[in-house]
Amino acid sequence: MLFGFDENKKLVKASTTQKERTIYCPDCGERLICKVGMIKIPHFSHLKNSQCCSFSEGESAEHLAYKEGFQKWGRIFEEDWEMEAILPEIPQRPDLLSQKLVIEVQCSPLKISRLVERIAGYHKYQYEDWWLLGPKLTPEKKLTQLQKAFCSFSSDKGLHLWLVNQQGVFLYYFLREINGALFADRHQWMPYSVSLKEIYQTSFQNQQPLIHLRKTDASNWKKRLNQQLIKKDPYILRLQKYFYQAKTHLLYLPEWFYWPSWYFIFYQADILLFRYLVQEISEYSIVMEVFKKYLLDEKILWGFPRIKQQEILDKLWQESIFLLKKSEKSI
């Protein structure tokens, strides 16, 4: 951390404090060590076995530099950006704060349970939390469980993820997975080009790209499902068991079931079951009840703590109805 309390509970910065001076953590009250070296910028650190829940994780030189850089960037346009601001309601200190907007730069992996705890703390007291992932956490071929936990969703940006590196801030938006590959639209803001709040509030209304419904996409998905069945993939076998009990088969469903989905990232092949319920039951409330029970019975957990599951289920319902009607017209 870059700030601590002196003996008079006055907030002081590590870069302006003598190394021998006694400094305390504003959150837990433990004594801190002032570190000044050739690699990291001056900062305070807890002792090795500290139990502080706000700053128990060690901070890298990269993370410390991003915090200072973002404060400089923010204050070019708005004066009220605070670094490591003390929040009276919760025992956690954001990297940056302006009014009720929190910025957190995540440069290294952390436990998802810890992330969920921090997100819940911010949301409980109506803070907007804006998470930016450093280069080590940038998505590659697929989203990891941790990257999914950082994702947000909105009608104007779809599923999206914020990233940062020395070239600026990046937004991966309208994230979708088709035929096992990850796709996204991307936008970049150079350092100090516009205000941080303007970046955060960026909208891409009515720019959602089309997902083309091609026969090759459906056949490719069925091929992958067949390979998974041959390999006895537990996840696919579980789904096949459901269809078997319904007197059908995973590979012999109506063609529109295998068309690409904007929401494949959320539910993967379980989308086939959802579409099956839409076609067979057709009543919204019952479809939702049956699908949620299936998820609960199979212990399928929701992996997107920053996104409301019901919002995605509603989107999946609308998409399924659209595709069902489209398939009926093509007959």
Image (cartoon, rainbow, N blue to C red):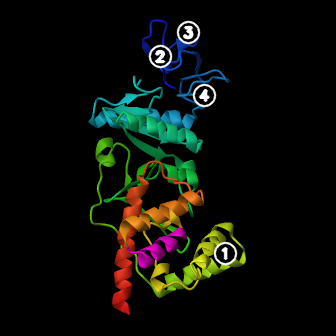
Distance from disc 2 to disc 1, alpha carbons, whole Å, reads 60 Å
Residue wearing tag 4: 38
> Which type of secondary structure does the marked residue at label 3 adopt?
loop
| Residues packed near mark 2 inside 10 Å, few (<14), some (14 to 19) or many (20 plus) | few
| Numbered label attached to residue 97 | none
- Which circle's residue, 3 or 4, is located before the other in the chain? 3
The amino acid beneath tag 4 is: Met
| Residues packed near mark 3 inside 10 Å, few (<14), some (14 to 19) or many (20 plus) | some
Choose top left, top right, bottom left or bottom right for residue 20.
top right
Indicate which label's residue lies in the foreground, 2 or 1. Answer: 1
- Which circle's residue, 4 or 2, is located before the other in the chain? 2
Residue wearing tag 3: 22
Start-end of magenta stretch: 269-282
In front of the other: 238 or 91: 238
Q: Where residue 27 sits in the image (x, y, percent)?
A: 49, 20
Indicate which label's residue lies in the foreground, 1 or 4. Answer: 1
Q: Residue furthest right?
A: 231
Residue wearing tag 1: 228
Q: Is residue 267 above or below residue 249?
A: above
Residue at 52%, 41% in the rendered image? 115
Q: Are discs 1 and 3 less than 8 Å apart at CB?
A: no
> Which type of secondary structure does the marked residue at label 2 adopt?
helix
Residue wearing tag 2: 16
Indicate which label's residue lies in the foreground, 3 or 4. Answer: 3
Residue at 36%, 87% in the rendered image? 328
| Residues packed near mark 4 inside 10 Å, few (<14), some (14 to 19) or many (20 plus) | few
Q: Residue furthest top?
A: 8
